[in-house]
Amino acid sequence: MKKVLVIGGGGREHAIVDALSRSPQVGKIYCAPGNAGIAQQAECVALKDTDVEGLKAFALENGIDLAVVGPEVALAAGVVDVFKAAGLRIFGPSKAAATIEASKDFAKQLMAKYNIPTAAFETFEDYDAALEYVKKGSFPVVLKYDGLAAGKGVVIPETLEEAEETLKDMLLDDKFGKGKVVVEEFLTGPEFSFMCFVDGLNVYPMTLSQDHKRAYEGDKGPNTGGMGAYSPVPLITDEDLEFSLEKVMKPTAAAMVAEGCPFTGVLYGGLMKTPQGPKVIEFNCRFGDPETEVVLPRLESDIYDIFSAVADNTPMPEIVWKKEVTMGFVMASKGYPGDYEKGFPIVIPAEVEKTARIYHMGTSVKDGQFYTSGGRVLMVVGFGADLQEAHDKALAAVESIECDNLFYRRDIGWRVL
Ligand code: AMP
Ligand code: GLY
């Protein structure tokens, strides 16, 4: 039986642990650092996801057969390179390949060079030059900080004053860190998340999902890491899917090979179905969160085989998806994505797990009691023959969970219900 180490400690990692626990080959799952929900299914290890040397030492000492990386910060810290150099098997991209997410400018330059459809853009280091460019264009305009910002580095000003303020934050006051800004054309249309298992030139699509990035109902409020998701996405036709695979995901994998940084792991295409067809909004170098919590429960195949095929560069088995569909609601701490308090008790009725699956995103436990410990706290996933049924089950479960400091969007799935 195989021993697996999952790196990370959010809802995405809970869903990965959950999928691995369904594999008949997997005997023991460790998760570093994990969380209170993950601890019900795996042994949590008190190591930070960016403690690359500590993780390597743990894997060597414990005879880990395979490591699976969740968060981009661990990938950007080079965990895959360090594990591979030590002869350890690991699923995820190298530090160089992870740049496709870590630098928006790198991703945009790559798309420009290889004709991958995306919004028109220009990159700036200088505040005055950026402001000049914005003044010449139209509003709204999209301003993206060129670095990792947990989904919060994108601002879409409606007015020049607002744009000026954001550019100041990003380029003069370094509020997100020291970095460039990508100024992008504003596109319209429904977004969808297209995650693929990628091994160099080989691209194996997962079923589609759709996230809800804005904090409040009606797609209002600031951008977040994601407030809810569902899978599949009926708005996206077979033709859109074919285009997205053939004109976006496969050429991007090929471009990474051509650039000398072949991608291995999950390549996440954040796409928008614009009136001119699907275009790339962003690439991520890992599973999406909360998308993973609605996609992996639908996976029929053994995920250990899939991870192994990518990690070992061996043939991929057929990937089979269930007919059952999913929808999930994120319950977040009041104040998120801004400042919020932690440590509020959460009561999850025992019956909830009969009709929904609860993935813990940010919880801790003391004396058998769960507490909030993050911005996003729980992802509550319902299952059904159709999205309405999945929605109703998830919402009923959400409403039965008691906590004084959580909020959620009730309109998850509004585009398709
Ligand atoms: P990103 O982190 O690049 O995915 O951006 C976060 C969110 O901002 C996206 O999910 C979109 O909703 C929005 N966004 C980003 N780029 C654009 C664009 N060019 N046009 C319209 N909306 C965008
Ligand atoms: N839910 C969007 C992301 O994982 O980046």
Image (cartoon, rainbow, N blue to C red):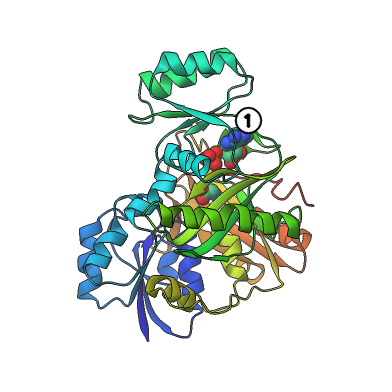
The location of residue 120, given as percent across then percent down, is: 58, 32
Q: Quadrant of the N terminus?
A: bottom left
Judging by the rendered image, the residue that carries numbered circle 1 is 186
Give the left or right position of residue 156, taking residue 54 as reference: right
The location of residue 183, given as percent across then percent down, is: 51, 27
Estimate how packed mark 1 is, as few (under 14), some (14 to 19) or many (20 or more) residues with alpha carbons within 10 Å. Answer: some
Q: Quadrant of residue 128?
A: top left
- Residue 155 position (above or below residue 333): above
Q: Is mark 1 within 8 Å of ligand 1?
A: yes
Count the marks.
1
Q: Nearer the viewer, residue 39 or 254?
A: 254
x 44%, y 75%: residue: 309
Residue 140 in sight here: yes
The location of residue 287, given as percent across then percent down, is: 49, 58
Give the left or right position of residue 201, taking residue 68 as reference: right
x 24%, y 76%: residue: 62
Q: Please state which amino acid type lies under the numbered disc 1.
A: Phe
- Judging from the image, what secondary structure is the residue with disc 1 in? loop
